[in-house]
Each structure stands twice: as structure tokens, then as C-alpha cells.
Image (spheres, grey):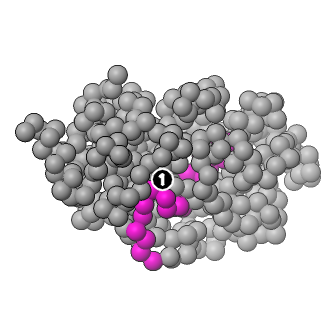
Amino acid sequence: MSRVGVVVACLVSFGLIVSAPLHGRIVTPAQALDAPTEADGWQTAAPSAAGLDGAALLRMTEAIRRGDWGHVHAVLIEHGGRLAYEAYFPGPDQKRGQDIGTVAFTAETLHDVRSVSKTVTSTLVGIALARGEIASVRQRIASLLPDRAQALAGDKARITLEQVLAMSTGLDWDESAPYSDPTNDERRMGASDDPVGFVLGRALVHEPGSTWNYSGGATQVLAAILEHVTGRDLAGYATERLFAPLGISATEWLGDLAGTPSAASGLRLRARDVAKIGSLFLHQGRWNGRQVVPPAWVATALDAHIENPDPGSPPFVLRAAYGYQWWINTFQTALGPQDVMAAVGNGGQRIFVVPALDLVVTLLGGDYNDPRRFWTPEQLLIQQIIPTVQAHSE
């Protein structure tokens, strides 16, 4: 038997792969009945057919099952335009900060994506720009939020949409405390009767555009802008303009910030649907031949607008920058330095886009508020997944 045959036999024996009806999809035993449908829209392939090392992926799967990588709930890998690995793992989970016990995850399970919500909100801004609902990222937000003229008077009147997207508004903001801590500014915003007013009312402590500062408040301002310029609620606009074109029908957008969900952290999606968003940004905004997001937006969102936003990065991070609610990194890997664009959420939620390797990796997890595990998804990508890439599929 060939090495590929041995790998497939092992995967079948472990209940991790099923044959023809599921098109080589790797699953847990509990998922064996969850066959993908045409409505999902994915082209699928066995790992070896997509240029991935199946034996190495099996070893990774076993390590995740042992708990070597913390509470990983889902791993999906797209390579060469095909979904080639998909695995789910049971574990403890939360729903917007509330423990919900141990969940047996499947392809149909909704999962918190936490701050990946920011990337989705930014993407909606790109769609609104393409539709002419917003004229330019260089617009001052005072012109996009005319009902906030008083809050945006004086020096704050210089703040632009681009600076909100890149989290460089200059407004005072502190999310360094745990999100369970009521002094965390995102928590304080959520408790306010006027969340957007709370954000815009903060002192201007830096020249707009000069200094990066992580801010869920900035994302909530983006949501307010979208609702004003489109005349639609955030969730409804997302459904019509982004989710429906991707075939995403099961969503929740939690939180109630004066009638708007939490744009920064409230979204819940299936793992496959999170992976579709990553695929959009690998394929210049296209999904199954349809242009969902403008290619110009993909390019500018994934461009570095602020350098070195996190000087505490570990040694494998050769470069760290920030785009439009995307992290722009260069990681040292077994295949050399790789540019990696990342949507990052608390607890192990990640979308990694690696253009040079034609690769998208989606991770969901349950290590919420655990600083010891903050870099675990990046380490899993670098140590376990990127080394499996053997060739680009034709």
C-alpha cells in the first residue's frame, strides 16, 4: 500500500475521514452523518489531493485531542482553492462570556468569533464604499455621523473613517483589563445608555492617525456609521450584503448596545462560514465566481496602515502591523518567512490568510481570557499546519 493509502486507512480507522459521499472531508465520529451540501458552496478534496501532508495532519489531530494545544474546537484548512481538512473537537465553551458547558461541536454548531466580528464589520464598510453609501475612507466621521456634531467638535472633527478602521483615532481607550473586569472600556461602553456617545466622548490624547490603540469602541463607531449611511440595522445589512452571497444562513449577532449588537465581539457563526470569510480575502473578494467584496477593498484592508502595534510580540513574529481591522504579520516558519493576515478573536478564534502558500486556516477555540494561550493559535499554524504544505494545487 502507498503512503497515501496508509494515511487514508489510518484516518478511516480513527473515524476522522469518510469516503466519497463527503468528498474527503475530515470529521470527528460524531459528525459522520453531517454530509456537506451543494448549498455550502465549497469545493473539497482529501488533504493529499490538495497538496497537504495527511500523515502530519493526523498527528496534529491526535495532539489536539490530547489537549496539547488547549481547548481547540475546530480546525479548517483551505489549500489550492479547496477545503481539504475539517475537524471538530468537544470542549467547554461560552456564549458571549457565559459558560455553556461542554459542547460536542459539529459543522452546524454556532460559535462565538469574538473580535473576528471586527473584521466582519470592517468588511461591511468596504461593501458600503463600493455601493456609494460612503464616499471615501478619508471622509471625516463628523460628516458620516451628523447627529454627533457636538461630540465631534474641535480637534476631534479631524478624525477620519480611515483612522477609525485602523484604530488610530487618538481617543483615550483602555481594553488592557480582562473583559470580565467592569473597568475594561469595552465593558463600560456596553453598559452605557449611549455606547457611541461614550466612545466619542473620550478625551483626544493623540493626534488622529499618529498612534494605534486597540479599541472595540472604534468598531462600534463603524457600526453606527453603517447604520446611518445605509438606513439598515447592522445585522440586516450584513445578512443582505455579505452573508447571503456567501450562502451563510445561520448566524447570531449578540449584544444590545442601544439597539445595535456588539460590532466588536458579538457575532456567532459556523466554522465553515468563518472560513468562507477568510477565503474571500485570499481570492480578492470572490466566492464561487461572484464578486462579494471589491478587490480594491481586499487590497487596502490587508495593507499595513500602522506599523508595530504590539511591541510585545514573540520572536517568531518578524513584523507586526495593522490594517483595517486585520492584523498584518510576517512569521518565521519552516517554509521561510511568510506574510500572514489574521482576524483575531479572544479565546483562540482566528482566520489566517497566507497568500504565498495559497492557504487559509480557520481556528475556533475555548481558551477565553487566558493570556498563556494568546499565541497558541499562531504556534499551531507555524508548527503544525504550515509544514504540511507540500505543493500548490493546480
In percent of the image, x 28 and y 46: which residue is there? 19
Q: How many marks?
A: 1
According to the picture, the residue beneath numbered tag 1 turns out to be 271
Q: Residue furthest front?
A: 21
To which quarter of the image does residue 175 belong? Answer: bottom right
Quadrant in which the N terminus appears: top left
User: In the image shown, does 376 or 77 lie closer to the viewer?
Assistant: 77
Q: Nearer the viewer, residue 287 or 329?
A: 287
- The vertical placement of 308 against 152, above or below, is above
Which residue is more in the foreground, 246 or 168?
A: 246
Pick the front one: 387 or 235: 235
Q: Residue 245 at x, y = what percent? A: 64, 39
Judge whether 52 appears above or below 258 on screen.
above
Q: Is residue 182 visible?
A: yes
Residue numbers of the magenta segment: 101-124
Q: Quadrant of the C terminus?
A: top left
Q: Residue placed at 75% from the left, 64% from the top?
A: 257
Instruction: Give the x, y percent position of residue 119.
Output: 60, 46
Q: Position of residue 99 (x, y in %)?
A: 51, 76
120 horizontally vs 192: left or right: left
For image coordinates 91% across by 46% down, the residue present is 146
Q: Position of residue 346 (x, y in %)?
A: 50, 60
> Residue, x 73% and y 71% (percent of image)?
191
In the picture as drawn, the residue positioned furthest to the top comes out as 394
Residue 88 in the magenta stretch? The answer is no
Residue 113 colored in magenta in the image: yes
Q: Amino acid at mark 1?
A: Ala
Residue 284 vertical position relative to residue 308 in the rendered view, above or below: above
Q: Residues within 10 Å of mark 1 (few under 14, many from 20)?
A: many
* Helix, strand or loop status at disc 1: helix
Asked if residue 207 can be seen in this view, the reply is: no
